[in-house]
Image (cartoon, helix red, strand yellow):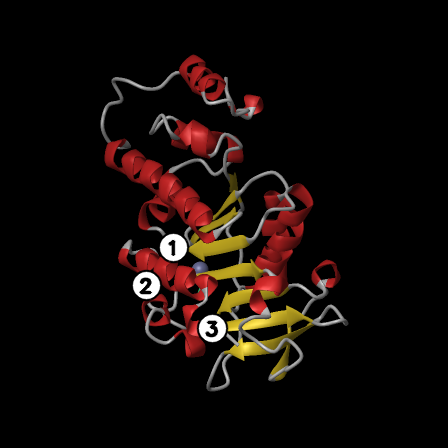
Amino acid sequence: MKNIFEAPFILRMRKVTQNAYRMGWDERNGGNISCILDEEELKDYLDLNHVIRTIPTGFDATPLIGKIFLVTGTGSYFQDIGFDPESTLGIVRIAKDGTTAELLWGYKGGGKFTSEMPAHLMTHMARLQKDPNHRVVMHCHPTNIVAMTFVHELTDKAISHSLWQMITECMVVFPDGVGVLPWMLCGTNEIGIATAEKMKEFRIVLWPHHGIYGVGTDMDEAFGLIETVEKAAQLYMMTAHLPRLNTITDDQLRLVADAFHVKAREDFLD
Ligand code: 2HA
Ligand code: ZN
């Protein structure tokens, strides 16, 4: 068996969580990440027949039966994941009943996965239907995007349009726009269902006055997507109270989309 502490998926999780912490997106135990692991790769590191214990998920995840996830633990601090991955992370497989997770590694000391597991697993189900290469769901609390939800109209169209206008690159990185939910109680199946519903259309979903969900085919892509949205929100917040003398027009946004061969959400342009 290879040493799991040197596995690329553990090293990448350590890198991403440390960077997110330093970006100020994950104060205290804020934020969580889940990543679908490749069984072929994992079997060099773990005996997949050895289940340490089982943990109920609290809902039916039948489409994910047999899938294996690396997931941050509830209550764990992102700043701790780098030096103590085995206590702060877990590897779980969705069992044959669809409602139980089998712990294969981690959550040392009796922990369990993030309280936002419903939103994560339901989002994985929604995104896998759209993109078979989908792998990662990342949730965190970037300062400016949360600030923006206090001062901006909360519709998918209005918020996507404002973000696109902040940096030319935004149209290239998220031509599909961002979705936004009404304020809802976090950690519930209800917010999971609402998040996954938006994820049928978007790769970014905002939880007003709380944070953001971003997805990707790997951790760097999910991180980069959130990073780009947060940068745009920062520019919005830096300029929102100042007279707007210049902007990127809708025709210019279309020009960017054409030049970079991406398909802008036309109904979000005027
Ligand atoms: O895990 O971010 O939304 C802490 C949170 C809950
Ligand atoms: Zn949160």
* Residue 98, x across and y down, in percent: 73, 68
User: How far apart are the alpha carbons under marks 1 and 3?
Assistant: 29 Å
Give the left or right position of residue 172, taking residue 236 as reference: right
Is residue 201 among the parts visible in the rendering?
yes
Ligand 2 neighbours mark 1 (CB distance < 8 Å):
yes
Residue 145 locus on image (x, y percent): 37, 45
Which one is earlier in the sequence, the residue at label 1 or at label 2? 2
Q: Amino acid at mark 2?
A: Glu
Viewer-side label of 2, 3: 3
The residue labelled by disc 3 is 4
Question: As shown in the figure, which amino acid type bears the numbered disc 3?
Answer: Ile
Q: Which residue is mark 1?
A: 141
Seen at 59% across and 48% down, the residue is 134
Q: Residues within 10 Å of mark 2 (few under 14, many from 20)?
A: some
The furthest residue to the top: 251
Query: How much space separates mark 2 and mark 3, taking CA atoms?
Result: 27 Å
* Nearer the observer, 216 or 46: 46
